[in-house]
Every structure is written in C-alpha cells, then in structure tokens.
Amino acid sequence: MSATDRITELESQNTQLTAQLSSLSADYDNLKQQLDWLKRQLFGEKSEKRLDIDPAIQGNLLAQLGVESPPVEPPETETITYQRRKKNRDGAMTDTGLRFSDDVPRAVFVLKDPEMEALPESEREIVSEKVSYRLAQRPGSFMVLEYRRVVYKRIGDNKMITTPR
C-alpha cells in the first residue's frame, strides 16, 4: 500500500469518525435534555412539598438508636386578606325569576284538563293557576313561553286536580 493510498484511507476514516461524532453529540445533547426534564419532574418544586409529621404520632427512629435529632420547629404561617368588588345584580331578575324585561315577546298557553272540563261548572271550581316558563329561541331572537296550568277543586269530594304538563 502506497503512502498516498494510506493518506486517502485515513482521511476517509477521519470524515466518517467526524460524522459519527457529530451524530453522537446530538444524541447526547438530546438525552441530557430529557434527563434534566425528568430530574425537574422528580426532584423539582412539585416534589419538594413536605409533610409535617407530628413526632408524637410518628416515632423517632434516631432516638431509638441513641442519636439525638434536631428539634422540629413549626412552620411559619402567613395570613392573607383581600377585598373584592361585590357584583351588582340589581334588576337582573324579575319577581317571576326571569332575567328578561317585558319587551321580550311572550306566548301564553293556557292548559286545561279535558276530564275536568267535561264536568259541569257546578261540580268544579278553579282554585289557582300554576305558571311555568320556558325560553324558546327563534333564529335571531328569543321568546318566553308561558304555560298556565289550571288547578281545579272538585266540589263533590274537595279533591285538588292540576292539569298535567
């Protein structure tokens, strides 16, 4: 083997080793970054929370071995006070529980019990109404649906009957 062939071969090996070194260096940096992240997860601030254990409950192992442990000081506490603005909801809800004003369109449905309506007026009496509200949405607007259910009292046996929903 001639000297020039040997030099060419060494230069080729040098190029390969340089490429391999840069690849291994990139892998090392990547693995080092992963290891640092894992260390932060395992030993970082999140894991440094300590439980304060009452020595009366947890026995002192060092005292049993004859070694004196340093006294445990209670942790310092800090009282934090703050003020916040009270939310003003005056006029937000009406006496009926709705949060809409009277300018919202309203559809009223009076529901009557067909069985009670079949009885003559002398045998039934309207005592009150139960009102429930639903919110309906039309494309681009809202409407309040008000359902009034009539409550009857049958005069013969004084039984109260409410129209089903």
Image (spheres, rainbow, N blue to C red):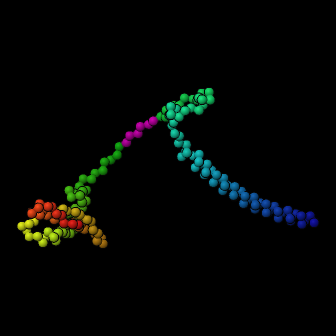
* Residue 128 visible to an observer of this rendering: no
Image-based side of 53 in relation to 95, left or right: right
Q: Name the residue furthest front.
A: 157
Q: Residue furthest left?
A: 122
* Residue 133, placed above or below residue 36: below
Q: Residue at x 92, y 64 (%)?
A: 3
Q: Quadrant of the C terminus?
A: bottom left
Residue 4 position by quadrant: bottom right
Residue 80 on the magenta segment:
yes
Name the residue at 17% across, 69% down. 113
Does the magenta segment cover residue 78? yes
The residue depicted at 51 percent of the width and 37 percent of the height is: 52
Residue 29 is left or right of residue 157, and the answer is: right
In the image, the segment drawn in magenta is 77-82
Image position, residue 143 (x, y; %): 25, 68
Name the main secondary structure of what is drawn in magenta: loop
In the rendered view, tell whether residue 80 sits above or below residue 88.
above
Instruction: Tell which of 91 and 113 is nearer to you.
Output: 113
Name the one closer to the observer, 28 or 125.
125
